[in-house]
Structure formats: C-alpha cells, structure tokens
Amino acid sequence: MSGPRLQTVGRDEDGMRLDRWFGVHFPQVTFGHLQKLIRTGQVRIDSGRAKTNSRLEAGQAVRVPPLDAEVKRIERKIDAEDASFLRSLILYEDDDLYVFNKPHGLASQGGSGTKRHMDGLLKSLPNKAGEAPRLVHRLDRDTSGVLVVAKTRAAASYLGKVFQSRSAQKIYWAIVYGVPKPAQGSISCFLAKQIVDGNEQMVVVEQNHPGAQHSKSFYSITDTAARRFSWVTLKPVTGRTHQLRVHMQQLGNPIMGDPRYFDIENFQGAPGLGEGLQLHARRIRLPLENGKTLDVSAALPPQMMQSFEALGFDPDRFDVKEQDPENA
C-alpha cells in the first residue's frame, strides 16, 4: 500500500467495533499501533475522527493509512502451543462455532496491560479462509465457564442476533456471602459506569441517570453452608457489565472473592475456600441456525471445586441436562 485508501464496511460488518474490524482486515497491526494511528488522525470514518471502540455501519468508508512502511508484513505463524491450549478447552465444536470452558483469570479481550486473552489466542485457530474465530459474547476475566465463539462472519452475525434477542439462556453458579432472602427471586435495577476510588465499576442509579441501562437477573438458592454461605444459581435476562456481581451485592449477598463488589465489613473467611471470584458460567442453551438447540455445560474450575468441597456442596447433586435447580 503506497498511500492511504478508503475501504468500505461490508453489510456483515455492521455494528462491528473499529478495533475488531482492523483485526480482521489487517491482523499485522497491533492494538497499540492502531491506537497511535487513531490518535494521530490517520484512521478516520467517513472523514470524521474515530475511536478504537467506534461502532461501524455498513457502507461507511474507513480511511486506512499506508501500513507497509510502518508495519512489517509477515506471514502469521500459528502458535502450536496456543492452539493446543485452546483445543484443551473445547466443550463443543461444529462447522460454525466453538464452545470453550474459559479458565478463571483469562480475559476475553485485550485492554490496558492485558497481553494474553481469548481474542488474541483465537488467531491460532483460523478457519479455512484464514480468518480468526470471533467472540460473540464476553465473560469477565475472573469469571470462568462457557464461552461461545463463531468460526465465520456469517455465524458471528447469526449468533450476535441470538444474544441480542435474548434467545440465549445463560445459567451461572456462584458462592455468595450469607443466605439470600427470599430463597428465590429477581433483581431489577438500572446500572451505569462510574469511577469509584479511582476504578471504573458499575453502580446502581436512577432510570434518568446519564448512561443508565436496565438490568434484570433471576436467582435461586441451591444449597447453604452453616447459614454463612450459599450456592446460588443465577440467570441473567440482560447482559450488562458485571451485572450478576452488582445484583448480588445489591441483594446483600455479594459473590465471594469479588475484588470490586464484596463489601461486607469485618468479614471472616472460612478455611479451605478457593482464591478468586467464585462465579462460573455453568451452562448455555441457544437455538442454532439448523433448527437444533445447543445445550452445553462446563465443569467447575479448580478454585471453585476447592470451595465446593470445603463447604460440603455437591456439584453432581443435579443432573447437568435435566435436573438443574432452575428447572426443578
């Protein structure tokens, strides 16, 4: 590329973030380098300034600066170690998608100071066209469990609509402080991002607050330990950032190990509990394009298995497919 050029956003790319669009078309451009190009105005959308998280619309023209002069174009080598690691996480696979059991501590996407993440690792599993699989939803870095990834743009478009329409049923398991009252119910409130003690987190706000988004989740107690801890099953209806974590905090039963939202003063722990956030995306059910239903469950991660054993909870008490507590 000897000079800047304009590239049109395709119909199947409508709604895609600019940084992800660049990752598809120009994988040799690192996230940091893209930020520099945007900051200096070399990347523009319909002649206007852009941000890495700008949402593209079909038909828009993206100004792409000369890249060969700054970025040495090399054949991307598939990292065999990363590919092997990802394959060890696969719970389900077909021609259109993967379902992974994402480990606790591994981010879904990159960000400030995050070098290793699912989105980057997926480049080691290209499809037949050489394209990296695409995330269609997210899990927090410290939330483990089922993560759906599309193999193609067409599959990503279909699955994106499934998640937007709330046709996907997501079920989480968590260990929380105390015993929620009532034993089952729902939490509904408006959430917005705010800076708290120098950190960005979600807080409950009034409906008319700038940036407020409605959120709703269902919860039910599966088991309790000494009236101090509970194993709860959670069903998010909406998909806001940190939604389940904030909802349980609002209920007065924050999730154990939550570094942002656990706010019990003078808390005394229990011996043997695992370290880290005790929240796991246990199961997902969603309609496939072929008319069938995908129904996949993920085993608990080691730190939650440790906590279950310490508290006397039996993860095999409910059959994975038929008798999960939310169906009882």
Image (cartoon, rainbow, N blue to C red):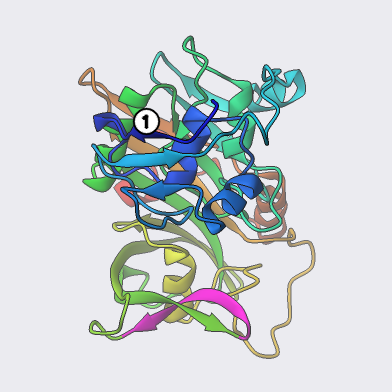
- For the residue carrying disc 1, how many other residues have a C-alpha within 10 Å: few (<14), some (14-19), or many (20+)? some
Seen from this angle, which residue lies furthest bottom? 265
202 in magenta: yes
Label 1 secondary element = strand
**Percent position of residue 96, x then y:** 38, 19
Image-based side of 127 in relation to 188, left or right: right
**Percent position of residue 179, x then y:** 49, 75
The residue that appears at 59% across and 83% down in the rendered structure is 263
Image-based side of 204 in relation to 112, left or right: left
Q: In this view of the protein, which residue sits in the foreground, 74 or 157?
A: 74
* Residue 126 appears in the rendering: yes
**Quadrant location of the N terminus?**
top right
Residue on which the image places disc 1: 295
Image-based side of 180 in relation to 11, left or right: right
19 in magenta: no
Q: Name the quadrant containing residue 82.
A: top right
Seen from this angle, which residue lies furthest top? 128
Q: In this view of the protein, which residue sits in the foreground, 313 or 136?
A: 136
* Residue 319 appears in the rendering: no
The residue that appears at 20% across and 21% down in the rendered structure is 291
Amino acid under label 1? Asp
Q: What segment is highlighted magenta in the picture?
A: 197-205
